[in-house]
Each structure stands twice: as structure tokens, then as C-alpha cells.
Amino acid sequence: QVLLVESGGGLVQAGGSLRLSCAASGLTFRGYRMGWFRQASGKEREFIATISASADTYYATSVKGRFTISRDNAKNTVDLQMNSLKPEDTAVYYCAASGSTLRLGRQVGEYGYWGQGTQVTVSS
């Protein structure tokens, strides 16, 4: 059974930082593309960042230069370092895993496994 568990969310002031972590189990982690998505209240889930099995990364324009995705295959974790946070970054953040090596990892439908989400609230 695949399990993804996010942690690290919370309340932070604008300009601050948070580090989210996702612990994965039940899959051969090193072979999976991992992604972070977020969903604000009343909006659709949107792509934030992805890291391939070979550690290639790609970011949404809205977070590029502020967020950094990284993975530790020894610990089966993928992290999202978020700096210079803005109120518009407020959302539930989800970790996801994709076994496909043929896709770019920017679409919700490419991911077969999802965590339960962690709330990030940025106050102005």
C-alpha cells in the first residue's frame, strides 16, 4: 500500500519561509517522479513543482525562484522549501507520486498517488 504523508505546514507571515516534507512508503521511491501541488479554497488543484527520478526539476512560473523541490532517495522523502511567501500562496499543499517516465509531471492526472495535504496559511 502506497502512503504519502505531508508535514510542515502552518501559519507564517508574508515574506517568511516554510519547509514542507513528504514521506513516502510502499513504493520504489527512487524510480518515481514526485510532485507538489496546491489547492486554494474554491479553486482547482494547481501544479507547483516536480522532480524526476533523475532529480530534474521544473517549477510553476508563480513559484519559480522562491520555491525549491528536492528529494532524498535514502530517506524516501521529497521536500519543498518555500521562501518569500505571499498571501496568495495560501492553500492546502499536496505531495504526489507518478510512476510514469514519459510525462513531464505538470498535470494532476499524471499522478497516481496523493497525500492527504497540509495547510499553508500566509498572513499579510
Image (tube, rainbow, N blue to C red):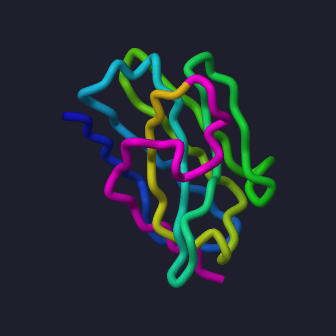
In the picture shown, does residue 97 fall above or below 116? above
Is residue 50 within the magenta segment?
A: no
User: Residue 115: x percent and y percent?
Assistant: 35, 50
Side of 58 relative to 24 (left or right): right
User: Residue 66: x percent and y percent?
Assistant: 74, 51
Q: Residue at x 61, y 32 (%)?
A: 51
Side of 80 relative to 124 (left or right): left
Quarter of the figure that contains the N terminus: top left
User: Residue 33: x percent and y percent?
Assistant: 53, 29
Q: Residue at x 54, y 42 (%)?
A: 35
Side of 53 relative to 14 (left or right): left
Report the span colored magenta: 101-124
Side of 40 relative to 64 (left or right): left
Is residue 107 within the magenta segment?
A: yes
In the picture shown, does residue 121 fall above or below 27? below
Q: Residue at x 52, y 68 (%)?
A: 39
Q: Residue at x 67, y 35 (%)?
A: 104
User: Residue 6: x percent and y percent?
Assistant: 36, 49
Quarter of the figure that contains the C terminus: bottom right
